[in-house]
């Protein structure tokens, strides 16, 4: 699973969720992942998404549904 040719994820590729994670933080993360830009070979990971508050989860889902139409080849893992 560890490859010397592949770098570790950078800070902008990972969102570690807690009950205090805001909708703004999740929104910025989803925009980085789903809006096409150069260097689009990154794999984004949202960890502990089940820790998000109900309100933040709902807003994140709405934003995800809206943004995914801009990029059909996104790389997003939600755990």
Image (cartoon, helix red, strand yellow):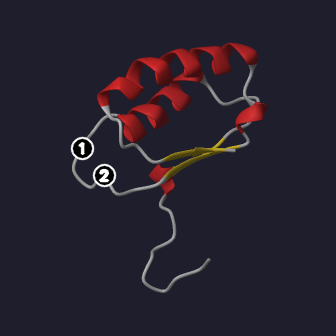
Q: Is residue 23 left or right of residue 53?
A: left
Q: In x, y percent, where is residue 44?
A: 49, 49
Q: Residue at x 68, y 39 (%)?
A: 17
The image quarter containing residue 39 is: bottom left
Report how many numbered discs are placed on residues in the image. Answer: 2
Q: Residue at x 51, y 70 (%)?
A: 8
**Location of residue 63 with respect to 40 vertically, above or below:** above
Q: In x, y percent, where is residue 65?
A: 47, 20
Q: Residues within 10 Å of mark 2 (few under 14, many from 20)?
A: some
The image quarter containing residue 41 is: bottom left
Q: Residues within 10 Å of mark 1 (few under 14, many from 20)?
A: few
Q: In x, y percent, where is residue 13?
A: 48, 52
Residue found farthest to the bottom: 4
Mark 1 near mark 2, Cβ–Cβ under 8 Å?
yes
Residue at disc 2, secondary structure: loop
Q: In x, y percent, where is residue 32?
A: 38, 39
Residue found farthest to the left: 38
Nearest the viewer among 51 and 3 is 3
Query: Residue 37: which disc?
Result: 1
Q: Is residue 49 left or right of residue 7?
A: right
**Location of residue 67 with respect to 44 vertically, above or below:** above
Q: Which residue is label 2 attached to?
A: 40
Looking at the rendered image, the quarter that the N terminus falls into is: bottom right
**Location of residue 72 with respect to 8 vertically, above or below:** above
Residue at disc 1, secondary structure: loop
Q: Residue at x 69, y 44 (%)?
A: 79
Task: Report, in whole angstroms, how far the alpha carbon at label 1 lies from the one at label 2.
Answer: 6 Å
**Location of residue 76 with respect to 27 vertically, above or below:** below
């Amino acid at each position: 699973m560890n490859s010397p040719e592949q770098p570790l994820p950078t800070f902008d590729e990972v969102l570690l969720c807690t009950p205090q994670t805001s909708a703004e933080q999740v929104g910025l993360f989803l925009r980085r992942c789903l809006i096409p830009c150069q260097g689009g070979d990154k794999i984004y990971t949202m960890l502990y998404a089940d820790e998000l508050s109900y309100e933040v989860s709902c807003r994140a889902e709405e934003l995800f549904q809206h943004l995914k139409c801009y990029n059909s080849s996104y790389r997003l893992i939600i755990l």
